Amino acid sequence: MLTIDAQVHAYERNHPGRPWHAVLTGPSEVTGDQMVAEMDAVGVDGAVLVSAFTMYRYDASYAVVVQKHHPNRFAVVKPVDPANPAAAEIIADWKRTPGAVAARMLLIRGGLTEDPADPGLNRVLAAAARLSLPMNLHIAGRLDQGIELIRRNSDTQIIVDHLGLVQPHEPPLPKEPWAELPKVLTLAKLQNVARSPAPARCPANRFLIKTSGIRSAASSTRSGSIVAYGAPTGPAR
């Protein structure tokens, strides 16, 4: 059985040719070649490479370069800006990109409206449905809005990013890290939902691997790997 990591990020050092918008907690660089070496070290066969929003916002060009260099190891996911009037055309173009398996929309991190009826948000999800392109939806901190968006777009295959839970990159940890878990579990009732199990940080510093009733993809960390399955992320990645 193949071990596929459902979400990794690769990025270059900050430089004028591809400048960062902000700094992501972690190494100063994790290039595509370095990521492949890490995957080989822990027995991960392939990964879904999600363009790093913190550094590159809606520019997925580095992820595309990495996938081109390692076409048998990575599939790619691009963040989409629903405030862009050309979002539907951008998604259609992305669908034609070699290795593309999904698009991504980040509610809080993208500074987007809290209205689940917002035309821009729904236009993006409807375009993804028309193209049979799964949508990674980062709804941590916006679960009520995210659940309503998902219900309004039942024809769109949704992959819930980061378990749908707020996961700080640095201490302090939330006092009640599982407070919104009941809302996450309501996602299990929605037929068009899978989840991307980026390891959840909890007070015991352990990782939540399974969420009852919600199909999962595969995940790995730089110190080990977890095998899981279910997210429709396409062929070998």
Image (cartoon, rainbow, N blue to C red):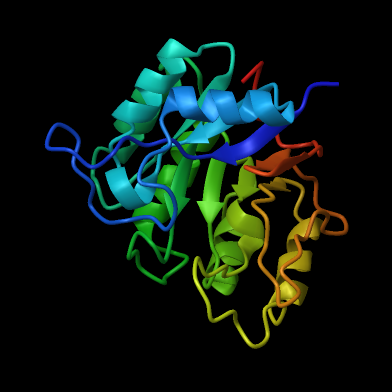
Relative vertical location of residue 143 with respect to residue 73 in this rendering, above or below: below
Asked whether residue 57 is in view, the answer is no
Relative vertical location of residue 41 with respect to residue 166 in this rendering, above or below: above
Q: Quadrant of the C terminus?
A: top right
Which residue occupies 42% across, 58% down? 25
Viewed as shown, does residue 82 lie left or right of 202? Answer: left
Outermost residue toward the left in this view: 16
The residue nearer to you, when weighing 108 against 190, is 108
Q: Quadrant of residue 189?
A: bottom right
Which residue occupies 43% across, 36% down? 30
Which residue occupies 62% across, 42% down? 222
Q: Quadrant of residue 218?
A: top right
Which residue occupies 27% across, 56% down? 22
Relative vertical location of residue 30 with respect to residue 153 in this rendering, above or below: above
The residue nearer to you, when weighing 38 against 102, is 38
Viewed as shown, does residue 163 lie left or right of 137? Answer: right
